[in-house]
Image (tube, grey):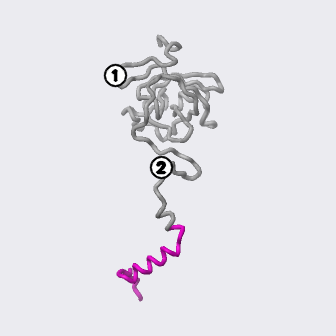
């Protein structure tokens, strides 16, 4: 029985170089500059997580798409160190500081809920907040839909110096 051996030496290097030059697609991919663009995976475009996102301490409202935390995140640690409770009013934001309390309003149903930003994300292009399943249900986002257009209006925004700044929705939620 003949045993397969791996060739090394000058002949192998020449053969390898000849094969590489015959396949321009691979050479082009190898020589292409690294891109900072998000990678596409199975038709889903995801943004690359940012270790230190630029935080928004202004307290101004923003409009965008909200999504619901996936079930697999239940019980996992969030960015603030707490465990994700799907029955609590927690949320994730890339730009609001951890500990921010905000009013999230579903623009289709008009229903609102108060959330606390305890995690980072969502890392899907165009989404501004991930909501716990109970909060999503409270404002009318069903598991079938999964996403909705919302307004996120901060109530209390922790500042870098340790103070708390009232946000755009502070007057509406006073005393609660």
> The magenta stretch spans which residues?
1-26
- Residue 31 in percent (x, y) is at 47, 63
Picture residue at 51% right of the left edge, 36% below the top: 69
Dot 2 falls on a residue whose secondary structure is loop
State yes or no: discs 1 and 2 in contact (Cβ < 8 Å).
no
Front: mark 1 or 2 = 2
- Residue receiving disc 1: 162
Crowd class of label 1 (few under 14; some 14 to 19; many from 20; radius 10 Å): few
Q: Is residue 103 left or right of residue 4?
A: right
- Residue receiving disc 2: 36
Query: Which residue is most to the top?
Result: 175
Q: Which mark is residue 41?
A: none
- Residue 47 in percent (x, y) is at 50, 44
Viewer-side residue, 122 vs 10: 10
Q: Quadrant of the N terminus?
A: bottom left
- Residue 97 in percent (x, y) is at 42, 29
Picture residue at 48% right of the left edge, 19% below the top: 167
Picture residue at 60% right of the left edge, 35% below the top: 147
- Tell me which corner region of the image, top left, top right, bottom left or bottom right, holds residue 166: top left
Dot 1 falls on a residue whose secondary structure is loop
Viewer-side residue, 70 vs 130: 130
Q: Is residue 32 above or below residue 14?
A: above
């Amino acid at each position: 029985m003949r045993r397969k051996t791996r060739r090394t030496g000058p002949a192998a290097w020449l053969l390898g170089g000849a094969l590489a030059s015959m396949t321009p697609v691979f050479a082009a991919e190898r020589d292409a500059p690294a891109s900072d663009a998000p990678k596409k995976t199975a038709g889903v475009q995801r943004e690359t997580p940012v270790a230190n996102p630029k935080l928004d301490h202004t307290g101004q409202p923003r409009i965008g798409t909200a999504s619901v935390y996936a079930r697999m995140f239940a019980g996992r640690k969030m960015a603030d160190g707490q465990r994700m409770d799907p029955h609590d009013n927690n949320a994730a934001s890339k730009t609001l500081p951890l500990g921010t309390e905000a009013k999230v309003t579903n623009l289709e149903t008009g229903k609102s809920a108060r959330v606390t930003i305890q995690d980072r994300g969502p890392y899907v292009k165009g989404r501004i907040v991930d909501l716990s399943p109970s909060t999503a249900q409270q404002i009318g986002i069903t598991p079938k839909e999964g996403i909705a257009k919302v307004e996120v209006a901060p109530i209390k925004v922790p500042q870098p110096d340790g103070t708390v700044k009232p946000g755009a929705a502070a007057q509406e939620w006073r005393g609660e």
